[in-house]
Image: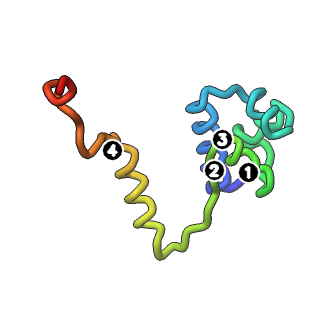
Amino acid sequence: MNYSVQALAAKLKAAREKKGLSQRALGAKVGIAQSHISKLEQGLIDLQLSTFIDIARALELEPVLVSREHLTTVEAVQKLSKGTKQTPAYQLDEEDEEN
């Protein structure tokens, strides 16, 4: 397995853990055995494109192709969105709520 496939498998594992799903629960959502999920995450078997898409979508991720020309921009937006807290543009003060 080459590095890029290992990186994809690691990202899927991180997304699964972030969602609080066990390998068994993810396997049930996708229709594959827990042992297969385990082997994919460990890099013991090759990750097929169809399986990758199914797992990604089960984790509420959408795989997309980005041209190299735009990759830097996409990565910058991702970094910015990770550290950004969404806050309302306007929020009532306590005094405003009473009136």
Q: How was the colour assigned to the protein in this rendering? A: rainbow
Residue 68 in picture, x, y percent from top left: 51, 73
Marks 4 and 1: which is nearer the front?
4
Q: Earlier in the sequence, mark 4 or mark 1?
A: 1
Q: Secondary structure beneath disc 2?
A: helix
Q: Amino acid at mark 3?
A: Leu
In the visual, does 94 lie left or right of 31? left
Question: Which residue is label 3 attached to?
Answer: 59
Which of the pair 34/43 is nearer the observer? 34
Q: Which mark identifies residue 8?
A: 2
Mark 1 closeness class: few <14, some 14–19, many ≥20 residues within 10 Å: some
Q: Earlier in the sequence, mark 4 or mark 2?
A: 2
Marks 3 and 1: which is nearer the front?
3
Q: Earlier in the sequence, mark 3 or mark 2?
A: 2
Q: Residue at x 35, y 52 (%)?
A: 80
Q: Earlier in the sequence, mark 3 or mark 1?
A: 1
CB-based contact (under 8 Å), mark 1 and mark 2: yes
Alpha-carbon span between mark 3 and mark 4: 22 Å
Question: Which residue is label 4 attached to?
Answer: 84
Mark 4 closeness class: few <14, some 14–19, many ≥20 residues within 10 Å: few
Residue 79 in picture, x, y percent from top left: 38, 51
